[in-house]
Image: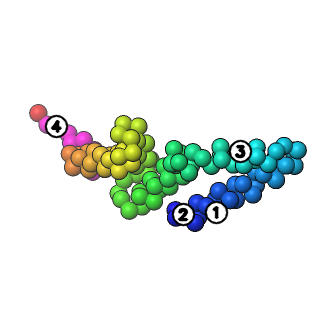
Amino acid sequence: MNLLSEAAIFLAAAVVTVPLFRRFKLSAVLGYLAAGVLIGPFGLKFVSAVDNVLRPLLLSERSEINGLLLLIGLLGGVIAFGGVGLVLGPVLMATAVGLFKAFTVDGELPSRSL
């Protein structure tokens, strides 16, 4: 998002919280503080829940990987590798799925004949 849209989100949060706090006969400063507490983690990029949910849904249509596997790879990559895991997790999951498909026949393990 660009700076203008982020500023609009901060302004909208303040427009909602300040009158709400004033209605409950609390200070407007507390309303601004509540808006900052609600939006602060998103603005500082500590929380990006929308990205963690939408990215697998958008990427699964472009790839041949199940969306659930892509989500597991994404979350596992973030847990294991931090920020780099957003890219590295799905890449490793796609590699594992590709290797599984390469060593199996039509998704089934090949039978061994003695």
> Which residue, given by chain and number where applicable, does mark 3 sit on?
34
Question: Viewed as shown, does residue 102 lie left or right of 87?
Answer: left
Looking at the image, tell me whether mark 2 or mark 1 is earlier in sequence order: 2
Look at the image and give the residue range highlighted in magenta: 106-113
The local crowd at label 3, few if under 14, some if 14 to 19, many if 20 or more residues have their Cα within 10 Å, is some
Judged by depth in the image, the label closer to the viewer, 2 or 4, is 2
> Which residue, given by chain and number where applicable, does mark 4 sit on?
112
Which is more toward the observer, 27 or 17?
27
The local crowd at label 2, few if under 14, some if 14 to 19, many if 20 or more residues have their Cα within 10 Å, is few
Give the amino acid type for the residue marked by disc 4 in the picture: Arg
Specify the quadrant of the image occupied by residue 79: top left
> Which residue, given by chain and number where applicable, does mark 1 sit on?
8
> Which residue, given by chain and number where applicable, does mark 2 sit on?
3
Is there CB contact under 8 Å for labels 3 and 4?
Answer: no
Which is more toward the observer, 78 or 70?
78
Write the residue at 65% across / 43% down.
Answer: 37
3D distance between C-alphas at marks 3 and 1: 17 Å
Write the residue at 38% across / 62% down.
Answer: 62
Is there CB contact under 8 Å for labels 4 and 1?
Answer: no
Is there CB contact under 8 Å for labels 2 and 4?
Answer: no
Give the amino acid type for the residue marked by disc 2 in the picture: Leu
Give the amino acid type for the residue marked by disc 3 in the picture: Ala
Write the residue at 71% across / 44% down.
Answer: 34
Q: Is residue 109 magenta?
A: yes
Which is more toward the observer, 79 or 58?
79
Dot 2 falls on a residue whose secondary structure is helix
Judged by depth in the image, the label closer to the viewer, 4 or 1, is 1
Specify the quadrant of the image occupied by residue 9: bottom right
